[in-house]
Every structure is written in structure tokens, then in C-alpha cells.
């Protein structure tokens, strides 16, 4: 074939043959991004103004030396534990919410669905529980925390409740998906042979999915640690609240120490959760 | 000496209860799951015990009253035209923050993913470890903490929120992108490299076309997350619907709070659907 072609076509093109369409799409994207930049007051040069630069440099400069006094470190240790405890207690309560709702909402445990369509009442109940889970999940935990801080006052109670509600919704929804996507044959066999729904769950559904359910729960616990720090910013106690206080007082050394502790805590939770999930699978 | 006559043992009876069928002991030092469960229980008990949780206050009549009043005042939500237009501005700001933040994060993440990945066997990848450390640091500080930090240099408003989203998401996307780049089939890149093509052009013409759908899919997924995050970032003063929420909730204007919450939920649901459709098309 190549013998027929004139030699000039055999040479590779000097420049990108598709440069024109590329240029067009890039400029179109920039034009579309323009109104977004206006809406977000996107002015990076603000960062480089002399006053701002001075304030930033002062704040960053005060990061060193780190605050390492014994009193401060023991406070940080206490608050770090409270952060972990808030996350753990929150996830525990989330399980208390999620497990019954999952049992109520999963289709696999429906007796009437064994013979074709689910009956009307169970269908309505399951759908209602699903909607409840979606609503719980889609209100961010920060908003729940803002509400509960006004009801029960500042402190970890608001954080625990906020995590419990949001994570209850998340866990319930994902548990349902896991249970329905797994092997359902043993469960259906049990149900067909007259076992109760709980029996079918404990002997059919749970053993086949236990590892995956635990793995997802551990992963969510890790997320809860991160979000319990964030909840501290609206007054739910823990490391976040202290971080917020120190930031408001421009105390760079304390901020830097707490950020380092927080990054270490997240890395630790990440490792622990990865190790647990690996040993589960 | 006569042996006592033993009844003939049927194979079924012999297997009735052999020693290995005894129920397992409740706790066995060699059982990993037992240690895991025990540790978990200790952690949970310690957590509840060490936090002075005010259940009495939460279940008190007073709390129930104020909860009831809150919810009662939610209805009817404030839908007056003046407030609705404010809501629209807030929602647009939140949307813009999430889009621009994600776009910046994708650019920054890709720029960081290049040094953070080992593209071929002979690649020394000197920058891999330090860049990954940087990505982890960016990723492990949540958006809200970034926003609170950036308020100092970028001032109150959506700009700080956009930068905060961009920094956190750059950490997340950078790591995902680096993994995608490392897992790409090596054939096309090796073919170009054997011809003496430089590493920049190998990336542009061999690696990028192969990973682009995956990168876009990750970016869309993070966009979904970011719109949720952008909705609440305003609580620390970084613009959008969150700022409205913190403001009106602080003044206990519950009917306005209700419509802000409604707008948040609506926007999140809308973006979920859009992104789901887009990802479905990309991966089809």
C-alpha cells in the first residue's frame, strides 16, 4: 500500500493535527467558567495584595515554634480522645438506627415477594423506610449539629447525635444495597421452607455478607472521625472546637500543633481501617 | 478375658458428636475476630463513658419543647419573592463554588499526579514519595478546616470556599489520578518511548487518552461530593447557601432556615441525577 502513496504523506505531521478542535474546546471551557469565576468572586490576586500577604505571612510565621507546653499537649490529647470517642459513639448509635431500618427495608426478606410481586402494604412500608433513610442521609451532619447545639447546648452530645442520624441513614442505605446485591438464594430457600424473617436473616443473609458489612462500617467509622473534627467548628467539642478557638485568636503555634495531630490521627485511622478491612477479606 | 460386647457402631452414630463439633469457646486467644470484637466493645464502652453525654437534657421536656417549636416554626417555609431570589443567588454561588473548585482541583491534581506516579519500569520517580506525602496532607485536612484557614488570607466569601474545596479535592483526585496513571496498560507508551519520544509527549499521546474517561469519572464523582461540601462550607463564613443557613439559624428565623434546607436538598438531588447520567454515559 505505502508504495502507492507519495513520499510526503509518510512524514509525521510537524504539529498536532488536532490543535484547532483542542483550542476551540479549551476556549469554550474558559468562556463557560467565566460566570462561575464572577459568582465565586474568584480573584487570586487578592491573595497577593500587600496587606493580605503580610497577614498571611505573619500567621504562617507564627506556626513555628509549635506549641509544645505540657499543659497544652495534655489538652490536645484529651480533645483528640474526645474526637475519637464522639465518632465511635456516633457510629454505635448510627448502627442502632441503621440495623432495624435495614431489616425493615430490604426486599430480600420479603415473604410475599417470593411468589412474584410484593404485596401492597409491605411495599409501602419498605418504600417509606427507604425515603426516611434518604432524608436522614441527605441532610449534612453539620446541619444536624447546628440544630442540636441549639437544643442540647454546646458539647459532644450534639456531635454524637448529628453523626448518629446522618451515618444511620448512610449505613442503612448501603447495608440494604449490600444485602440485595449478594447471593440471596440461601435466604430465599430458608424463607420458602417456612423459616421466619429474622431466622432467614441470621442464618442466610448475615453469614454471606458479614465481611462486607463490617468492612463498610469500619470505613464509615474512619469517615466519622474526620467529620467529628469538622463538627467541633460549630461547637460540638473535640479537636475541631479547640482548633477553631486557636484560629480565631491567631495562635499559629497551637494551630500548627493541632493540625499535625489531626493529620496524624487521620493517617492512623486510615491505617487501622485499611488493616482491619484487609484482614476481613 | 472377655471384652464387653459393644453394639455395632453405625457410621451415622459415630459422627453424632465428635469432639471437634463442640461449640467454640466464647473467647479464644488465637481467634482474631474475638480480639477484634473485644477491642471494639472496650472502645465503645470507653467512648460512651468518657463523653459526658447529656441524655437527660436531650430527653427532657424542655428539649422536646424546643425541638417541637423548631419543627413547628419550619412550616410554612418562607417562599416570599425577595427571599427566594436571595436563595437563588446563594444556590448559584454554591454551585459555582463546587464546579470551579472541582475544576481547579482536577487541574492541580493532574499536575501533582504526574510526579506522584511511576510510569514505567525504568522511571526513577524521585518525586513519588514526597508528592504522595503532600497529597495525603492535602487530603486529610477536611474542606471546612481548609476554609477556616484560608479565611485569614482570602477573606470572608465564596473565594475562600472555592480554594478550600480545590485544595482538599486536589489531594483526593491527585491520589486517584496517580493510581490510574500507574495502572494504565504499558504497551502504547512503551512503543512511543522505544521511538525516542520524550516523556511529556508520551503522556499526552499514549497515557492521557487511555486514562481520560476514568479521570473524568473520578472528577464527576468528586463534584457530587463537593456540592454537598460547598453547601455547608458557608457555616464558617465561606459563602453560598451555608452562610445563609448559619445566618438565619443564628437569628432563629426557622421558616427561612426551612427553605434554605429545602434548597440544599433539592440542589444535591439534582446534581446527583445529573452526575449519575453523565457517568453512565461515560462508562457505557
Image (cartoon, helix red, strand yellow):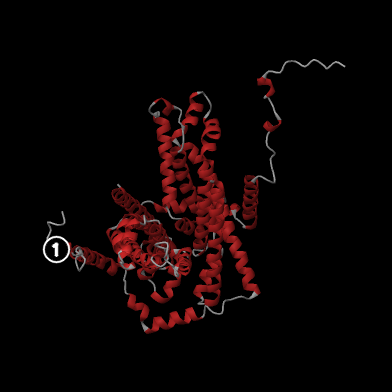
Q: Position of residue A141 (x, y in %)?
A: 46, 56
SS of the residue at dot 1?
helix
- In screen coordinates, is A254 left or right of B14? left
Image point (65%, 54%), residue name: B46
Which chain hosts label 1?
A
Left or right of residue A85: residue A119: left
Q: Quadrant of residue A2?
A: bottom left
Q: Residue furthest front?
A: A3
Residue B173, horizontal then vertical, whole percent: 40, 61
Residue at 46 percent across and 58 percent down: it is A142
> How many discs appear?
1
* Residue A195 vs residue A78, the one in the foreground: A195
The one of A45 and B68 positioned closer to us in this rendering = A45
Any part of residue B77 in sight: no
Residue plotted at (60% across, 52% down): B56
Quarter of the image where one finds residue B239? bottom left
Looking at the image, residue B12 lies above or below residue A225 = above
Crowd around label 1: few <14 · some 14–19 · many ≥20 (10 Å): few
Residue B35 in percent (x, y) is at: 65, 48
Residue carrying label 1 = A7
Residue B32 is situated, as x and y percent measured from the top left of the image, at: 63, 47
Above or below A60: residue B187: above
- Please say if B161 is above or below A140: below
Which one is nearer the viewer's eye here, B220 or A168?
B220
Q: Quadrant of the N terminus of chain B?
A: top right
Whether residue A175 can be seen here: yes
Amino acid at each position: 500500500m505505502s508504495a502507492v502513496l507519495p513520499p510526503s504523506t509518510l512524514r509525521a505531521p510537524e504539529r498536532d493535527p488536532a490543535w484547532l478542535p483542542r483550542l476551540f474546546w479549551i476556549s469554550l471551557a474558559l468562556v463557560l467558567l467565566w460566570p462561575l469565576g464572577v459568582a465565586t468572586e474568584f480573584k487570586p490576586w487578592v491573595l497577593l495584595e500587600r496587606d493580605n500577604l503580610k497577614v498571611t505571612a505573619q500567621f504562617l510565621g507564627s506556626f513555628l515554634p509549635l506549641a509544645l507546653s505540657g499543659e497544652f499537649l495534655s489538652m490536645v490529647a484529651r480533645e483528640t480522645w474526645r474526637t475519637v470517642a464522639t465518632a465511635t459513639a456516633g457510629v454505635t448509635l448510627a448502627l442502632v438506627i441503621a440495623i432495624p431500618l435495614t431489616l425493615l427495608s430490604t426486599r430480600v426478606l420479603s415473604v410475599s415477594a417470593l411468589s412474584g410481586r410484593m404485596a401492597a402494604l409491605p411495599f409501602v412500608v419498605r418504600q417509606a423506610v427507604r425515603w426516611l433513610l434518604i432524608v436522614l442521609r441527605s441532610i449534612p451532619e453539620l446541619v444536624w449539629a447546628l440544630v442540636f447545639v441549639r437544643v442540647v447546648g454546646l458539647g459532644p452530645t450534639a456531635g454524637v447525635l448529628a453523626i448518629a442520624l446522618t451515618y444511620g441513614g448512610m449505613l442503612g442505605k448501603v447495608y440494604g444495597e449490600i444485602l440485595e446485591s449478594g447471593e440471596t438464594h440461601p435466604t430465599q430457600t430458608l424463607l420458602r421452607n417456612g423459616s421466619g424473617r429474622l431466622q432467614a436473616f441470621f442464618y442466610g443473609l448475615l453469614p454471606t455478607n458479614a465481611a462486607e458489612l463490617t468492612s463498610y462500617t469500619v470505613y464509615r467509622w474512619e469517615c466519622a472521625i474526620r467529620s467529628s473534627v469538622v463538627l467541633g467548628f460549630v461547637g460540638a467539642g473535640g479537636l475541631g472546637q479547640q482548633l477553631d478557638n486557636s484560629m480565631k485568636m491567631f495562635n499559629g503555634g497551637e494551630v500548627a500543633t493541632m493540625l499535625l495531630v489531626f493529620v496524624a490521627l487521620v493517617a492512623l485511622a486510615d491505617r487501622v481501617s485499611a488493616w482491619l478491612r484487609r484482614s476481613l477479606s | 478375658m472377655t471384652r464387653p460386647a459393644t453394639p455395632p457402631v453405625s457410621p451415622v452414630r459415630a459422627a453424632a458428636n465428635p469432639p471437634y463439633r463442640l461449640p467454640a469457646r466464647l473467647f479464644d486467644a488465637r481467634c482474631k475476630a474475638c480480639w477484634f470484637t473485644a477491642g471494639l466493645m472496650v472502645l465503645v464502652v470507653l467512648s460512651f463513658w468518657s463523653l459526658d453525654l447529656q441524655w437527660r437534657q436531650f430527653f427532657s421536656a424542655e428539649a422536646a419543647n424546643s425541638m417541637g417549636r423548631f419543627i413547628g416554626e419550619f412550616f410554612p417555609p418562607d417562599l416570599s419573592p425577595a427571599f427566594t431570589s436571595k436563595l437563588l443567588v446563594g444556590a448559584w454561588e454554591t454551585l459555582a463554588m463546587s464546579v470551579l473548585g472541582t475544576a481547579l482541583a482536577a487541574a492541580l491534581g493532574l499536575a501533582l499526579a504526574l510526579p506522584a506516579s511511576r510510569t514505567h519500569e525504568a522511571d526513577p520517580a524521585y518525586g513519588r514519595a514526597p508528592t504522595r506525602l503532600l497529597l495525603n496532607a492535602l487530603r486529610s485536612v477536611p474542606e471546612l478546616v481548609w476554609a477556616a484557614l484560608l479565611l485569614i488570607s482570602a477573606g470572608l466569601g465564596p473565594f475562600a470556599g472555592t480554594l478550600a474545596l480545590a485544595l482538599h479535592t486536589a489531594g483526593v483526585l491527585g491520589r486517584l489520578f496517580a493510581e490510574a496513571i500507574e495502572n494504565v496498560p504499558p504497551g502504547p507508551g512503551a512503543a512511543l518511548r522505544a521511538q525516542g519520544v520524550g516523556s511529556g509527549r508520551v503522556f499526552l499521546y499514549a497515557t492521557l487518552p487511555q486514562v481520560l474517561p476514568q479521570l473524568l469519572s473520578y472528577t464527576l464523582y468528586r463534584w457530587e461530593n463537593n456540592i454537598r461540601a460547598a453547601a455547608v462550607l458557608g457555616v464558617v463564613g465561606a459563602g453560598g447557601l451555608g452562610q445563609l443557613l448559619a445566618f438565619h439559624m443564628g437569628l432563629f428565623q426557622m421558616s427561612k432556615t426551612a427553605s434554605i434546607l429545602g434548597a440544599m436538598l433539592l440542589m444535591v438531588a439534582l446534581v446527583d441525577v445529573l452526575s449519575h447520567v453523565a457517568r453512565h454515559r461515560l462508562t457505557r
